[in-house]
Image: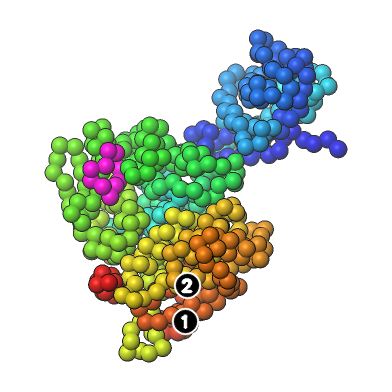
Amino acid sequence: MTVSSLKELRVLEGPNLYFPRAAIKLTLDVSGLSSASEATAERLAVRIGLKHARPGAPDTGFRQRFALRAVGRLVRAVAQESGTSSLAVRVRSTADAYQVVVAFPWANRTRAQEMGRAIGAVLDALPGADLEAAVSAAAERVAAAEPGEAPTTLTPTVPVVAVTGTNGKTTTSRMVAHIARTHGLLVGWSNTDGIYVDGAMVEAGDYSGPSGAGRVLAHPEVQLAVTETARGGILLKGIGVVHNDVSVVTNVTADHLGQQGIDTVDQLAEVKAVVPRITRKGGWAVLNADDPRVYAMRHVIKAKPWVFSRDVDSPGVRETLTARGRATVVIDGWVSVLRANADPDPLIELVDVPMTLAGLSRFNVENTLAAASAALAIGIPRATVIEGLRTFAPDAEHNPGRMNFFSLPGAEPDQGAISVVMDLAHNEAGLEALMEIMNGVRRPGGRLLLGLGVVGDRTDDLIEKLGEIAARDSDVVAIGHKERYLRGRSTDELDALMRAGAERVGVTGVPAYPTEVAVMSALVGQALPGDVVGVMCHADREGCYAWIAEHGGTPDDAATLAAKVRAAETS
């Protein structure tokens, strides 16, 4: 059976990893070219204009390098012979030595797709066919194709704040939207939960891709768009707008590796960099100065740099101010804005920002700095930014599913309450942040009880690492499965991986429960006053909220959280 050389043809609708505009991405099997004789490879090289190329022996590293060059030149040759005088082409190797990725911009959808299929047909002709004729036939095939529609990438008519990063992008985008609404703007924002207009969800679902931005910008009354832009949307569809006015990159850590050709954190950072790369000249790119991969994105932006850091003496802060950029930092416990040759502008004390747990939550301090920077950069007045930070709380109303705190009555009411915190915590950094805030509200003598859960499409190593962190940092750990997010794995398989991680730190016999609600019930049932129960909640947030309410639990307001932090500090 003949195997097609064209493994995938993907239409990217907007700015993407390869180009700042709509592009076609081809994944090609080049095993035929890699194994072809030197004479055959030389014939192809001559036909496509590489007359002096040296292909190297079959199945060698030299042949692999030739294959990358030849495929790119093949695309250009077919484009030129079919009537396109100039075409930009990007070629990348993959983890598979016999597969390459080729991308090129498109202006006519149908013809561009036909170009992809025609390139695959030429590679299919290897090694024994008439290569000269195969290339000519490919060009004729493309020239004869109907043009098809043009790209529909949107040019925004209202300001756009685009937020990306591994952790914190949902919280940061919600904070920016809240601050803007505090200013009286009608805000539309899209994220992994759905589409929101003026604080109300109008459509549920994961809208962190181009369709989310499109739906928000299509709303006739929206005055400001806030878009959460995830890795998957950039890779699978591209970004839905031609530019943004302010971009935010929170951080880049290991997550979703091994998917869509992204195998390293450096490659993931390159994907995230697409967002600040399309920030318009005159806009602001808000970058984490404490994350080297994020801070390095200043080299690819046209916009002005605005960095944030918990360390006022960070080298990134100094360099950015020297470059006439801005910085938002923490000075003596105050969120403060720095400009070159000016006094610091203290906005608000961290103890007055509920999301930071009086400054104990390192990640939410960073999210606060990022959100304040973005809000100021988009032109929201200073006083409004302060009020927005003061009134944004870690509760189900403002930030559902992210660091939500509750108090449940214990078996003996006079002995105090049990604290419960729900958070997505979907990767190593997220889980460590959850454990950090659980510790921040643990009363003297209290225990940490954790409901551990994972999504099935993570790597074995990551799942085991989550099990290790959970067992190492908690006093009691139990597994709560996410049936909707098994993604091809069985619960038994996930149990084995998480338990293997726990066993690395000497914890055995970790129990498992079928749902997040079930593991919460089990842990709360054995908790004592002063204990803190944490649940890595992703699949059934509403079910967990309902269970807490049914058992007398109440959301913690800012005053209650502050009291818990003070009580914990006496330990």
Within 10 Å of disc 1 (Cα), the crowding (few <14, some 14-19, many 20+) is few
Residue pointed to by mark 2: 476
Label 2 residue SS: strand
Q: Which residue does the image show at 32% across and 89% down from the upper left?
A: 414
Residue 526: numbered disc: 1
In what quadrant of the picture does the N terminus appear?
A: top right
Residue 566 highlighted magenta (yes or no): no
The residue type indicated by label 1 comes to Gln
**With respect to residue 44, does 468 lie above or below?**
below
Q: Quadrant of residue 109?
A: top right
Label 1 residue SS: helix
Marks counted in the figure total: 2
| Residue 364 point in image, percent of width and height | 34, 58
Q: Which residue does the image show at 47% across and 60% down from the upper left?
A: 469
Looking at this rendering, what residue extends furthest in the right direction?
1
Q: Nearer the viewer, residue 120 or 448?
A: 448
| Residue 80 point in image, percent of width and height | 64, 18
Residue 502: numbered disc: none
Please report contact status of discs 2 and 1: CB closer than 8 Å, yes or no.
yes
The residue type indicated by label 2 comes to Val
Residue 315 highlighted magenta (yes or no): yes
Q: Nearer the viewer, residue 445 or 342?
A: 445
Tell me: 245 left or right of 544: left
Q: Nearer the viewer, residue 256 or 471?
A: 471
**With respect to residue 399, does 73 lie above or below?**
above
Instruction: Please tell me whether the stretch drawn in magenta is mainly helix, strand or loop.
Output: loop
| Residue 426 point in image, percent of width and height | 50, 58
Question: What's the magenta region?
Answer: 307-316
Looking at this rendering, what residue extends furthest in the front direction?
506
Alpha carbon distance from label 2 to label 1? 10 Å
